[in-house]
Image (cartoon, helix red, strand yellow):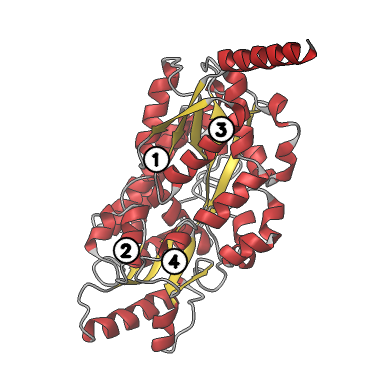
Amino acid sequence: MFMRLALAATASMALTSFAHAAEISISCGAVGQELSLCKSGAEAWAKKTGNTVKIVSTPNDTNERLALYQQQLSASSSEIDVFQIDVIWPGILGQHFVNLSPYTKGAEKEHFPAIIVNNTVNGELVAMPWFTDAGVLYYRKDLLDKYGLKPPATWQEMTDEATKIQDGERKAGNDKFWGVVFQGRAYEGLTCDALEWIDSFGGGTIIDAEGNITVNNPKAAAALTLAAGWIGKIAPEGVLNYGEEEARGVFQSGNAAFMRNWPYAWSLGNGADSPVKDKIGVVALPKGGEGGKNTGTLGGWQLAVSKYSKNTDLAADLVVYLTSKDEQKRRAIEGSYNPTITALYDDPDVLKAVPFFGDLKATFMNAVARPSRVTGANYNEVSTNFWNAVSNVLSGKEKAEDALTTLDSNLAGIKGSGW
């Protein structure tokens, strides 16, 4: 009798579990191994909880992805439950996301405090950190050794070393070889690269924490002028159309000495099929010169739950799982995605897989933020004006001083409408 009752109870529980099973949709990027790691993590959660997941692929271009999100959220669509959002978007999209604090059980205390502050809008934790980023400089260890060089301390040193290596490799028969590749297309990636150049020269952060426009200054002009001098000389003309993956493609194929990119490129560059496997070094991005500093733009992505989800509790549970210590450790080891949990930067397994995480811990913790918090909903317009001005300088359409003067005026117009 007891056995029959137990079996009946078990069957009842199974039916109840099945009845409550749901499909949770999550948007994932596809740069590097993002999509595959997102899928495997979400599927592990689904297996654990008895639910199913639907992976929604979104554009790699951050501008296109933001436009898609704004369209979905403005329509109060329930199509996506969990959104992967850029570190600069909480102020733009936060009103559409649920407060995750009731679901986290205090887990946010393990994460970098600055990112938690970034993800808190009007007192509500609208997103949990998934992985962080800062721009870094990749270099070919074998080629620096070949030419008797050391990793560059300044951008001018990088320029000189890139020129020397490029000349040597082309004389040796590789006419496709370039000194440096980076993200030069007119999009958010160029904002990240150019902010690094300018900040490293001591030229500020475009707009300061008090909302003052600071970008129109001689140090900023010097930084952009130097970068413009790379185009067609040590960087291909095509770099003006490069995003992250285009730059990685050139570097990983063995056709560049230096590359500015995010940490994700490390694991791919050291993959079994990579021509540059075991030939890559990574250091902090160079200083602008005397009085300058090493700087990397703060990047990274967060997970947020839509207020329009029909399964808020399950969606929040998926977010907590994917941003957990165990899952962040897995992603760090398999895909070199930077954890946002401080303790993982001292984890021996993580450091074995990605040694520079330990060397550059300070770079990741002190990365320079884009002015998204101070400009709020106006950030996208601010960034668009900035990257267009930089693009004009890189392409030779304008001198840096003229482009920054125009930019200053345009930003003043945006500020006039309030930020």
Distance from the alpha carbon under mark 2 to that under mark 1: 24 Å
Q: Which residue is mark 4?
A: 270
Q: Which residue is mark 1?
A: 62
Task: Give 339 or 165, whichever is nearer the viewer.
Answer: 339
Q: From what the image shows, is residue 325 above or below residue 201?
A: above
What kind of residue is marked 2? Ala
Q: From what the image shows, is residue 131 above or below residue 218?
A: above
Q: Position of residue 39 (x, y in %)?
A: 47, 39
Distance from the alpha carbon under mark 4 to that under mark 2: 30 Å
Earlier residue among tags 3 and 2: 3
Q: Position of residue 52 (x, y in %)?
A: 50, 26
What kind of residue is marked 3? Lys
Q: Residue at x 60, y 23 (%)?
A: 314
* Mark 1 crowd level (few <14, some 14–19, many ≥20, 10 Å Cα): some
What kind of residue is marked 4? Asn
Marks 3/1 in contact by CB < 8 Å: the verdict is: no
Marks 2/1 in contact by CB < 8 Å: the verdict is: no
